[in-house]
Amino acid sequence: MRTRPDVVTEDVVGDRTIRRDEAGYLVDPEDWDEAVARKFAGEEDIDLGDEHWAVLGFMRAFLADSGVAPDARFAFRFIAARHGESEAAARRRFFALFPYGYVKQACKIAGMKQPRAWSTG
């Protein structure tokens, strides 16, 4: 269920203030940087490694190019191409990185707004 976007809290990351919606997603994806990613990952008990950063970088580049967050299947295809494996294997690899899923963890850590229509992944 989507949270109310009008319920906003402020949070300090480093020397600046960011705004988050009721579920903790960034209100403005432009506020994202690596410090924000580390903070959000820490809140999810994820220690970001090279593979996490590759996926997050892909997601941020997709957002910059298209103006929208990538669908989970694009992230799975990115991982599949990166490792020369099937999308099914890539999906398993993805969930090893982000165990609670694409929307709950990957989108949040990558600084995306909370997706409106996705209910799985």
Image: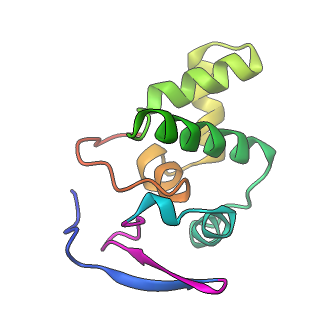
**Residue 65 against residue 74 in the figure, above or below:** below
Relative to the observer, which residue lies in front, 96 or 72? 72
Quarter of the rendering occupied by the N terminus:
bottom left
Check the image and name the residue furthest to the right: 50
In the image, is residue 118 part of the stretch drawn in magenta?
no
**Magenta span dominant secondary structure:** loop
Image quadrant assignment for residue 72:
top left
- Asked whether residue 85 appears in the rendered view, the answer is yes
Q: Give the residue drawn at x 63%, y 12%.
A: 86
Give the residues drawn in magenta, as a range.
14-27
Relative to the observer, which residue lies in front, 100 or 73? 73
Relative to the observer, which residue lies in front, 49 or 30? 30
Residue 4 location in percent, x, y? Answer: 19, 69
Number of numbered labels in the structure image: 0
Q: Give the residue drawn at x 62%, y 45%.
A: 56
Q: Give the residue drawn at x 42%, y 66%.
A: 26
- Asked whether residue 96 appears in the rendered view, the answer is no
Quarter of the rendering occupied by the C terminus:
top left
**Residue 93 against residue 28 in the figure, above or below:** above
Residue 24 location in percent, x, y? Answer: 40, 70
Residue 102 location in percent, x, y? Answer: 47, 44
**Residue 83 against residue 42 in the figure, above or below:** above
Residue 41 location in percent, x, y? Answer: 62, 64
- Color theme of the render: rainbow
